[in-house]
Image (tube, grey):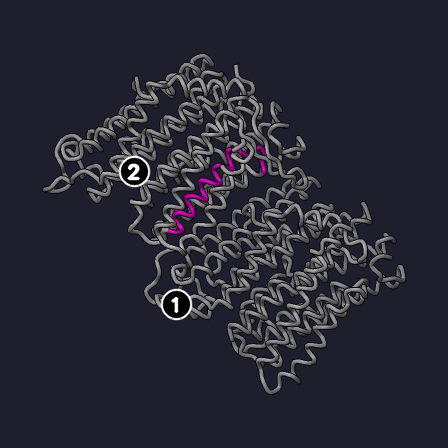
Amino acid sequence: MTTELLSYSIIPLLSALAIPFLGRTNRKISEIIANVTLLAGLANLAYIIFHPMNRNSDYAVFSFDGLTITMLFTIYMVALCCVFFASASHMVKAEKNAFYPLIMISVSAMSSMVLARDYFTLYIFMEALAVTSFSLIAGEEGKGGIEGAIKYILLTFPASALILIGIAIMLMSGGTINFDMINSSPSTGNLAALAFITLGFAIKAGLFPFHFWTPDAYQGAPSAVSAYLAGVVTKISGIYALVKICMTIRLFGEPAKPVAFALLLAGVLTLIFGAIAALMQKDMKRMLAFSSISQMGYIAAGAATLTPVGIIGAILHIFNHATFKTSLFLNSAAIEKSAGTTDMRKMGGLEKNMPYTSWTSIIALFSTAGVPPLSGFWSKLLIIVALWVSGFKLAAVLALVFSILTLAYFMMMQKKVFFGKPREELKDVREASAYMLAPAFLMSLIIVLSGIFFPYVFEFLGKTL
Amino acid sequence: MDPVSLLKAVVFLPLIGALAIPLVAGISKEVRNAFSVTVGILTFVCAVLLVPSGVMGNPVYLNIDFPLGFNFSISADSLSVFMAAVSSFVSMIILIYSVDYISHYENQTEYYSMVVLFLGSMMGLVFTKNLIWLYGFWELTGFASWRLVGFFRSDKDVAKANKTILVTVFGALLMFLGILIVYFEKGTLDMNQLRGSQISLLAASLILAGIFSKSATLPFSTWLPDAGVAPSTVTSLLHAAVLVKIGVYAYARLFGTVFVAPQAFSYAVMAIAGLSAIISAGAALIETDIKRIIAYSTVSQLAFIFLGLASGNQTAFSGALLYIMMHSVAKGGLFLCAGIIEQKTHTKDIMRMGGLYKTMPVTGLSFALCSLSVMGIPPFGGFFSKFMVFKGAVESGNILILSLFTLGAIMTLLYLSRLFYLVFLGEYKGGAQAPCEGSPSMVASVSFLAVCGIILGILVSYPFNYAVLISKQLGVNLQ
């Protein structure tokens, strides 16, 4: 592991240990510790990224790459928003002294995954993350939380097995599992090992045809947790590793093409399937879950082109997906609290009473659908450009055409939930509190700003990868 | 102000103004209305002040570098300034008219922000010289019109709003694909660098699909009559007079001044436009809803503009540019008349009107004058533009297409006469008491537009010379 950023994985762990003791008498204290830890981490990361001296020297004093720090930033950002929302909304029924430490441990596990520099470390923390996610999904009684959790854990076993097989092959053929050394030894053994690992992480990422656990897991979990899971947890435990592998196998040259092609095929099928399935949903959270699946397809397809533009597009899309999907899930949670349901057939005209929730949703969903100049447009554009120039013209056209479907299902959602005449029985619905809105506002701001200042974002990734 | 700051102002003033309106609305309603109207007027003034720099043939240029050639570059050449002046003029009128018109509806703040955002993205669209930003602003106008069509929030309105945005965004995505093909073939998105380059039939057709969907030409025409009926008159005017011109502008810009499309492509455009003209004119002949008739008439008139632009000679091209101007003014007048009539009779069904000329003489007269301009009767502005388009089309010499359009022109004459007859002449069929004239400010704006039609006809030499100048300065592949 890189040691210079290690504090980002150790401090949440310490705070996870501290919360049960310090918050024993007053539950408020556990909320405060969790929020402060994450906020401090985020501020710290922002300081590293935006400090003029670091920017001007192209981060030469650090050994991390742009992927690592972008992912750390994403993890802390989403975790902070979700924890803040959870403490502001009082929607989490589970024991607070269990809930916040769990989140902290999963933040620590994710940071360690991102900081890992060999496949075994990556694997260990992936498992740690899976255990915490399992507990978080099952945290709320009833509501299918257990079902989602069990589906999640059952799929994790074959995935872990495949990854372990891959690591074993790696050790047998080359004797090393270090990222850098694998990068520089493109042997057949390593490629076979990476193929197994890719398959394992494709299952974890919920790519087609291994997608079926995600909607249940997201729908069953408490809303703040589903935002956390959809926004970052399943992305780090699955798609991040896939992008990382793609960055490795692109150094292998021609022999890696079949693996990449399989991933690309899975990605394109995922984006098609996710969009079509989302179109048919009646429940807001389920629709968001399928939309999330579809976006994973874009990321996988972009990374699988093995071109710099495609990989930058994929990384950007992970970041963008974290912003818009967190915003949308948190808004659906706010609606669930105010209107008492996430069934879209029972809603309508909520915009009149919940204008801020509605407008932050609009920004997020237009970013998802790739409407310029929001950030989602640029990452999708990069992915489509990468697909086209690497010769997968049909895939590029499909990716483009299915963004109209993305827009279509979100238009349906907006129509059923917010737009339209207010319904009689929802007349007294109140806007969420300012604290609950704050995370969605922050996300909307990031979506708009990173869209408008896209050159800087692109330059940052281009220079540091 | 120097031209560069004017250029910045004309694009960013309405864009930032649109975001500021919700904040300003916090102060008071009056301040918000005044602010929106001021933004509209200032945008128009800036656009007009840019005319000299456009005429000089030495356009001001502003460029902000973006990676991979997605540079944000805007420049004020004669065509951009022309379109900006025309569309900001109509938008300004709409904003002034709105202050009265929508004062008793809900969601006014959203309405003003969206109209101003629309104006801003329209300005961005006409001034940008980069295809990717053309697409970006294109989608932004679609977003604004989505909110505006769904303004009344009933299920029907929202369904129509969704239809509008899905049709136009579908077209826009096809266009985007075309743009990407150009990007991969030529390696640049900058229109100045692309000027005069040949593009493949596939890319041209994809871009054309986007243009047709925005300007409501067959087979994408269905959203305009829907969008024109559901929401308020002001909104339908915004769509019929301004939004559809985006497609026409893009055609003039891309295929008139940037790309050289294959010959077959131009013929196909003319043929599709011809069919569009005939079919929508036929629909206008049998419709009984006054706004639908006017909306179908828009679809039909747009086809004439496409004929002029696609004919490939200078006369027709400048005629088409003139047509854009004349049509905006005359169609604006017709829509606002229809708005007054609808407000007073509480119906849109022309079978339940009749004899309104007696009680609404000013509206009736303005309606007649605007109709005459759309029909193309001298000395109205519409005559000159239609005449030039036909003259140019004769020179290019395709008899079949020409006869299609002559038929279309005759049908225009028929459906507008029928409309005028059923609404204003004969006996009132809507009840015992015929309605009275509209409010002074509304009638004033209608008669203002009608008079504009005559003035533009009499002083046609100025816009005419300007249109010819544009086609000389910028035209590519024109005879």
Which residue does the image show at 69% across and 57% down from the upper left? Answer: A70
- Residues in magenta, as a range: B109-132
What percent of the width, then of the height, locates residue B222? 39, 38
What percent of the width, then of the height, locates residue A339? 42, 68
Q: Secondary structure at mark 1?
A: loop
Q: How many marks?
A: 2
Disc 2 packing (10 Å; few <14; some 14–19; many ≥20): many
Q: Is residue A194 left or right of residue B258?
A: right
Which residue does the image show at 64% across and 61% down from the upper left? Answer: A206
Q: Is residue B125 magenta?
A: yes
Q: CA distance from mark 1 to mark 2?
A: 37 Å
Q: Is residue A10 left or right of residue A363?
A: right
Judged by depth in the image, the label closer to the viewer, 1 or 2, is 1
Q: Secondary structure at mark 2?
A: helix
Q: Please name whichever residue, A226 or B70, is drawn nearer the observer in this view of the structure.
A: B70
Which residue does the image show at 65% across and 46% down from the upper left? Answer: A383
User: Pointer 1 indicates a residue of which chain?
Assistant: A
Which amino acid type corresponds to the residue marked 1 in the rendered image?
Answer: Val
Q: Is residue A216 above or below residue A403?
A: below
Residue A149 appears in the rendering: yes
Q: Do marks 1 and 2 share a subunit?
A: no
User: Pointer 2 indicates a residue of which chain?
Assistant: B
Residue B205 appears in the rendering: no
Which amino acid type corresponds to the residue marked 2 in the rendered image?
Answer: Lys
Q: Which quarter of the rendered picture does the N terminus of chain A lie within?
A: bottom right
Which residue position holds label 2? B291
Q: Is residue B231 above or below residue A15?
A: above
Magenta segment, prevailing SS (helix, strand or loop): helix
Q: Quadrant of residue B417?
A: top left
Which residue position holds label 1? A429
What percent of the width, then of the height, locates residue A420? 37, 55
Q: Which mark is residue A46?
A: none
